[in-house]
Image: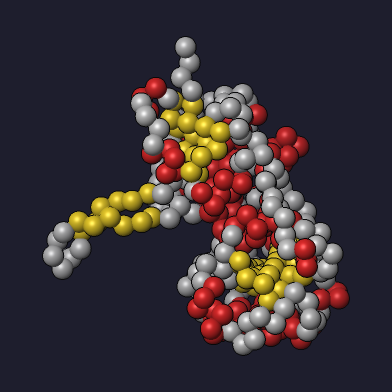
Amino acid sequence: MTKPTILLMSMDHYENRVIENNGSPIKTYKKMCLGHETNLTRFVLFDMLIQRHITKDDIVVTLKDRQFLYTKIFSNCIDSEAYQQIPNKQDYHIIPLWKITASEMHIDRPAIYQQFQHTMLEKVDIPEMKSLLNSFDYCPIDPLHQNTDFIVIHHRYQCSHEILQRMIEKVRKGNLYIPIIIFTSNIPFLKKEIENPEMNIYWTNNLQLYASYMNSPHCRYVISEWSGGGQLSHYCHDGPVLYYFNHYRDITGYVGREKQILKESMSSDFRGPYWDFKFSRNIDIRLYKNIGDLIENIENLKSI
């Protein structure tokens, strides 16, 4: 009898590291990159499903806040804590897709891909793949925003509050009263630092709610630092996504080549080129070298 399959998409992962001061090991937390999971690992998972190497009844394991990426498709989606409680794991065929999602860029991904024992689709720009990529399990947004336009800002962790303040001020110059939805993991600190933090500003650290806001037809545009948090919009938003480079730099000259790169990103297999530009919705990506360039070029809301 064939073993049931467990697909490890992303894990709460701990590793032992040695502290230089006293040499004693401690457990440290390593976050699995959201951008790698949405732009790489999900493509592999859905390719396996399309080619019938797995079924919708197989078990998908991811972080708790990312389960909505799979629950509309797979009947058994659990978080990594629940996975740790599964007894007799030797009775399952376990595929460690999380290794693709790990943040270390030196990982030998080709060796991992070979474990799947099947040939990947040569191209990802097919209706069946896009339909699966689009299948987020959304939640209701606030009734206040269901019939009115708003914008969404993703404020990346460790990014300065001054950058967020400048974006808010620029948006309000275009439309003083438009609601601004801010997705961030640093809400208490930012509320203390931002001027008038409750003036038509709505805060959330819920990834599913953030995606649901971007999916709304009333989302005029999304602003984000270039990162996995922003790239989630490629699978749940129709319209402009305004990116600025900060932690990651535009070392390969992306700015000004957005349309060409988007086209090329979907013309090959899931690995590249430009794997972090892949998309399944009607996005309009606009890239800026830094936050200053973005702020200078944010158009009046009426023209977007």
Q: Quick check: 266 above or below 249?
A: above
* Number of numbered tags placed on the structure image: 0
Q: Quick check: 250 above or below 277?
A: below
Q: Quick check: 21 above or below 297?
A: above
Write the residue at 40% across / 32% down: 86
Residue 130 location (% of width, % of height): 72, 41
Q: Residue furthest left?
A: 22
Let me know if residue 137 appears in the view: yes
Let me know if residue 272 appears in the view: no
Q: Quadrant of residue 213?
A: bottom right
Write the residue at 59% across / 84% down: 194
Residue 25 location (% of width, % of height): 20, 56
Q: Is residue 127 left or right of residue 182?
A: right
Q: Quadrant of residue 148?
A: bottom right
Write the residue at 13% across / 65% down: 22
Q: Quick check: 127 above or below 16?
A: above
Residue 58 location (% of width, % of height): 54, 28
How is the structure coloured here? secondary structure
Q: Residue furthest top?
A: 1
Q: Residue furthest front?
A: 143
Residue 226 location (% of width, % of height): 58, 65
Q: Quick one: 273 or 89, which is closer to the camera?
A: 89
Q: Could you tell me which quadrant the C terminus lies in?
A: bottom right
Q: Quick one: 283 or 2, which is closer to the camera?
A: 2
Write the residue at 40% across / 46% down: 107
